[in-house]
Amino acid sequence: MLDDLRAWERQPPHGSPRLLVVSAGPPEANRAMQLRSLVLLDNEGIAMRAFGASGTPMAVLVDGQGRIASPIATGAGEVMALARGHSKTIGGGTPESYSGSRGRP
């Protein structure tokens, strides 16, 4: 999946979301991934729990107002589909149903 993320960063589809990677581990290991996107180190899993994620890789789309705008994408295929702007292929429901109690992490 790392190669897919790097390729996506080199040529993101028009209108695709900006990527923020939430990761754990030492800064050196995260730098070694050679991602262009911002990497937030969260060794305690605070962000993961706030978004309702239970493992990796997982992703969620957050809108410009800081609201959850997609279901949680689980697994490399769904995460890359979300990054490519194909959130309709992830889970079910409508964006309004995603915000619920997790509207703002």
Image (spheres, rainbow, N blue to C red):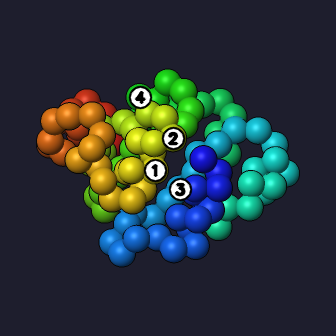
CA separation in Å, label 3 and label 1:
13 Å
Q: Quadrant of residue 18?
A: bottom left
Residue ID for mark 1: 80
**Residue shown at 49%/35% (left/top)?**
75
Residue mark closest to the camera, 4 vs 2 = 2
- Residue kind at label 1, given as amino acid type: Met
The mark nearer the N terminus, 4 or 1, is 4
Q: Quadrant of the C terminus?
A: top left
**Residue shown at 40%/71% (left/top)?**
13
CA separation in Å, label 4 and label 3:
16 Å
Marking on residue 52: 4
The one nearer the camera, 98 or 102, is 98
Residue ID for mark 2: 76
Residue ID for mark 3: 20
**Residue shown at 65%/30% (left/top)?**
44
Looking at the image, residue 75 lies above or below residue 36: above
Circles 2 and 1: CB atoms closer than 8 Å: yes
